């Protein structure tokens, strides 16, 4: 018995969560750099659309006129065959034609000779019901026998005239080859004693081409002129709509900029009010309380209960200093003074320090080449980082966060990674009121700035936010 232990399979590492794109860049440019719909562009679009429409109408017209011309040519060929059968062939038929009598054949030659010279018919054949050709202007076909098709037999059984495009590959049509496509018409005729025969004519198909051209010219003139008239009537309306749409787009972009600027201004005002008012007053109060605690210690009688007053005042002073630190951290969250003065790197460092003060380990990795964005895009990066860290503080229950700001060719990338509880991105982003409304609002701004915001997360797997901002 072998003592060898089975190989232990290594533990499989869980696959990282897939990326969920929260916002995509509209076209990679800022709102003020994007071209709105301009009247000149509208004219170009209308011109291209008109050209496409004309090509489509031309193709459709050619197909339609071709089909109509073919139907008319087939109908004309059928009428011609009926006329020849009734007025020329039927009167010249004799009973002896079935037996191949030379005199009967000569009589038909004389009857149809002038007709072949003056009409569009190029071949005539007369068949028996057994498939024998008893007459043709091509004498070499007389006496030959071929199988009749199902259509020909139906015409003999139920007398009527049928017309179709001829299949010249059939053996009985070998003498018609080389003359182009043919129209074939067949109908029944009878001899004086009532013997049924099949009368067949062949006409050139090029009459279809000629008639198709005539129909297309008539159709194209009306259609193209109507289309051009419609375009001329549409242009002023389109020009007006394009002008109004351009004004609406510019107004929307102006409102978006005003909203962002108003938010920043309001944050600046609140931060200034807190810093110059409440924070200063609390700081002064903490000094007063600390001084009162010192005086209370100096004058206190150990035998009296008032000896505890100094300790209580020192606790109150400590609480005030803690509140001041919290307010100063809140001021950094509300308005990052270092973003304007010291740049994006210092502002992100302040955010990291604010989170460290709450007991979370924060690793900050800043690429020196990454701090090359303009003011609006620096504020976007800061606000996304701020919102991600607020989500860490409120929801993630994380013990460690990594913030990385790095430069890539043509872009600056911000990564915020935490080891918290994670979440279901589809559910969270579908219900923004339950925790990610700030990120959803920032996603709209990021999209307009040409940036892409994405998250890789799952329940129990932490969260990895990534913002990619193009560099102009």
Image (spheres, helix red, strand yellow):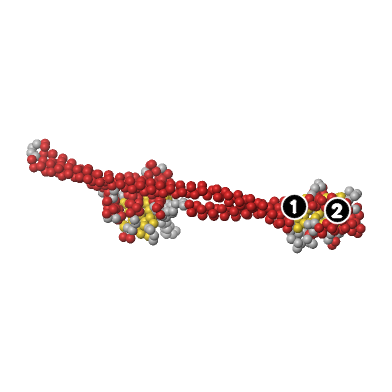
Residue denoted by label 2? 89
- Give coordinates of residue 342: x percent, y percent: 27, 55
58 vs 282, nearest the viewer: 58
- Give coordinates of residue 125: x percent, y percent: 83, 56
- Give coordinates of residue 175: x percent, y percent: 79, 62
SS state under label 2: helix
Q: Residue furthest top?
A: 305
Image point (37%, 50%), residue name: 463
Image point (83%, 50%), residue name: 188
Residue 371 visible here: yes
User: Relative to 127, is 45 on the left or the right?
Assistant: left
Image point (61%, 52%), residue name: 224
Image point (87%, 56%), residue name: 111
Q: Earlier in the sequence, mark 2 or mark 1?
A: 1
Q: Are marks 2 and 1 in contact (CB under 8 Å)?
A: no
439 vs 310, nearest the viewer: 439
Quarter holding residue 97? bottom right
Q: Residue furthest bottom?
A: 178
Mark 2 burial class by Cα count in 10 Å: few <14, some 14-19, many 20+: many
* The N terminus: image quadrant: bottom left
User: Relative to 208, is 54 on the left or the right?
Assistant: left
Looking at the rendered structure, the number of numbered marks drawn on it comes to 2
SS state under label 1: helix
User: Relative to 280, is 49 on the left or the right?
Assistant: right
245 vs 197, nearest the viewer: 245
> Which label sits on residue 192?
none
* The C terminus: image quadrant: bottom left
Q: CA distance from mark 2 to mark 1?
A: 20 Å
Quarter holding residue 285? top left
Residue denoted by label 1? 74
- Give coordinates of residue 5: x percent, y percent: 42, 58
Residue 145 visible here: no
């Amino acid at each position: 018995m072998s003592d060898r232990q089975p190989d232990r399979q290594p533990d499989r590492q869980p696959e990282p969560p897939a990326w969920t794109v929260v916002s995509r860049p509209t076209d990679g440019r800022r709102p003020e750099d994007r071209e709105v719909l301009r009247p000149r562009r509208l004219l170009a679009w209308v011109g291209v659309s008109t050209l496409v429409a004309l090509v489509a109408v031309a193709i459709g017209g050619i197909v339609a006129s071709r089909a109509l011309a073919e139907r008319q040519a087939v109908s004309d060929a059928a009428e011609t065959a009926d006329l020849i059968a009734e007025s020329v062939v039927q009167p010249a038929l004799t009973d002896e034609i079935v037996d191949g009598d030379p005199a009967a054949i000569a009589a038909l030659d004389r009857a149809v000779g002038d007709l072949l010279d003056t009409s569009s018919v190029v071949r005539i054949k007369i068949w028996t019901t057994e498939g024998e050709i008893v007459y043709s202007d091509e004498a070499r076909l007389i006496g030959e026998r071929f199988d009749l098709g199902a259509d020909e037999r139906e015409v003999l059984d139920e007398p009527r005239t049928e017309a179709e495009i001829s299949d010249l590959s059939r053996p009985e049509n070998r003498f018609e080859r080389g003359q182009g496509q043919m129209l074939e018409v067949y109908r029944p005729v009878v001899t004086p004693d009532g013997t049924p025969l099949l009368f067949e004519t062949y006409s050139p198909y090029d009459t279809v081409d000629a008639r198709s051209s005539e129909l297309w010219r008539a159709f194209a003139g009306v259609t193209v002129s109507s289309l051009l008239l419609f375009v001329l009537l549409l242009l002023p309306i389109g020009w007006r709509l394009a002008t109004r749409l351009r004004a609406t787009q510019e107004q929307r972009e102006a409102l978006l900029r005003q909203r962002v600027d108003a938010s920043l201004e309001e944050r600046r005002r609140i931060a200034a009010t807190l810093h110059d008012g409440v924070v200063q007053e609390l700081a002064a109060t903490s000094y007063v309380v600390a001084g009162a605690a010192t005086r209370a210690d100096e004058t206190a009688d150990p035998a009296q209960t008032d000896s505890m007053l100094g300790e209580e005042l020192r606790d109150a002073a400590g609480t005030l200093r803690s509140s001041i630190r919290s307010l100063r951290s809140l001021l950094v969250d509300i308005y990052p003074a270092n973003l304007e003065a010291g740049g994006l790197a210092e502002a992100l460092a302040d955010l990291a320090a604010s989170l460290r003060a709450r007991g979370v380990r924060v690793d900050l990795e800043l690429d020196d080449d990454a701090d090359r964005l303009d003011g609006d895009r620096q504020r976007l990066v800061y606000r996304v980082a701020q919102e991600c860290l607020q989500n860490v503080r409120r929801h993630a229950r994380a013990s460690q966060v990594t913030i990385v700001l790095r430069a890539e060719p043509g872009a600056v990338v911000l990564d915020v990674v935490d080891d918290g509880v994670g979440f279901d991105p589809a559910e969270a982003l579908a219900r923004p009121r339950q925790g990610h409304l700030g990120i959803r609002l920032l996603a709209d701004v990021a999209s307009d700035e040409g940036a892409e915001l994405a998250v890789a997360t799952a329940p129990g797997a932490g969260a990895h936010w990534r913002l990619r901002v193009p560099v102009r």
